[in-house]
Image (spheres, helix red, strand yellow):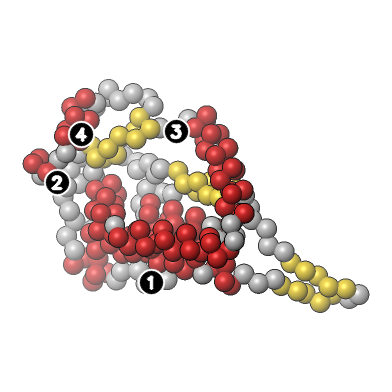
C-alpha cells in the first residue's frame, strides 16, 4: 500500500475554496434556495463545503427501516457473491479498482468539497482506494489452509466469511476508511455496507 503524503506534499497544495457562483449547477442553486437554514426536512441531510458553507448536496437520512432493508439486500447479495469462484471475485475487484482510477480527479475534487481536504491529500486518498482494491483482489490468491499438528490427530483451520457487516466511515477520511473496512473483506465472500459519513458542525 502506498505511503501517506508527507507534510511537504500536503502543504504544497492550497485548499480549494469551492466553486464560483458561475460554476454551480442549477441543481445546487435550487437545493440551496429551496432549503434555507432551519427548513430542512428531517429525512434529509445537507452536505456542506466547509470552506464556503455552500450546500454541495442533500442526501437521505437513513432510518432504522432503511438499515434493516440494507441488511436484507446485503444478505441476498452475499450469497450470490459467495457462489462466485474466487478468481471471478478478484476480477470484479480489479475492475472496480480500474473504475476508481478512471475517476481519480473527480473523486478527489468531491473529497475536497465534502471534507475540506487539500487537493494533494484528496488525490492520495482516491489513489489509496484504488490501490487497496487491487491489493484485496490478490487476497484470494493468498488464502491457504492452516494445519496445526496436535497429539493423536490434526487441527485444521477453515476460514469462513463473516456474512453481512456494517462499516461506519468517519467524516475526516471517508474514502480510505470506507475502503479499509470493505475491500479486504470482499475476497472471502463477506458482504459489506458502508454508512454515509456525517461531519460535525
Which residue is depicted at the point 53% across and 62% down? Answer: 88
**Mark 1 residue element:** loop
**Mark 1, residue position:** 2
**Mark 3, residue position:** 62
| Lower position in the chain sequence, tag 2 or tag 3 | 2
Say above or below: 99 vs 20: below
| Residue 102 seen | yes
**Mark 4 residue element:** helix
Q: How far apart are marks 4 and 1 (CA)?
A: 37 Å
**Mark 4, residue position:** 27
Percent across and percent down for residue 166 are 53, 46
Labels 4 and 1 touching (C-beta < 8 A): no
Looking at the rendered image, the disc whose residue lies closer to the viewer, 4 or 2, is 4
Residue 19: assigned label: 2
Q: In which quarter of the image is residue 33?
A: top left
Percent across and percent down for residue 77 are 56, 45
Amino acid at each position: 500500500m502506498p505511503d501517506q503524503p508527507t507534510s511537504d506534499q500536503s502543504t504544497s497544495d492550497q485548499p480549494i475554496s469551492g466553486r464560483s457562483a458561475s460554476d454551480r449547477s442549477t441543481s445546487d442553486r435550487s437545493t440551496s434556495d429551496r432549503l434555507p437554514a432551519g427548513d430542512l426536512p428531517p429525512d434529509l441531510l445537507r452536505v456542506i463545503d466547509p470552506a464556503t458553507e455552500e450546500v454541495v448536496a442533500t442526501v437521505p437520512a437513513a432510518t432504522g427501516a432503511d438499515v434493516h432493508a440494507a441488511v436484507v439486500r446485503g444478505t441476498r447479495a452475499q450469497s450470490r457473491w459467495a457462489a462466485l469462484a474466487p478468481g471471478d471475485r478478484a476480477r470484479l475487484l480489479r475492475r472496480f479498482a480500474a473504475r476508481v482510477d478512471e475517476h481519480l480527479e473527480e473523486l478527489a475534487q468531491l473529497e475536497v468539497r465534502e471534507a475540506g481536504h487539500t487537493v494533494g491529500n484528496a488525490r492520495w486518498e482516491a489513489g489509496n482506494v484504488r490501490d487497496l482494491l487491487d491489493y484485496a483482489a490478490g487476497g484470494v490468491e493468498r488464502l491457504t489452509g492452516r494445519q496445526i499438528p496436535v497429539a493423536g490427530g490434526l487441527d485444521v483451520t477453515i476460514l469462513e466469511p463473516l456474512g453481512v457487516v456494517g462499516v461506519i466511515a468517519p467524516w475526516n477520511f471517508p474514502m480510505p476508511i470506507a475502503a479499509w473496512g470493505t475491500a479486504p473483506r470482499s475476497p472471502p465472500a463477506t458482504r459489506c455496507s458502508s454508512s454515509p459519513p456525517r461531519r460535525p458542525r
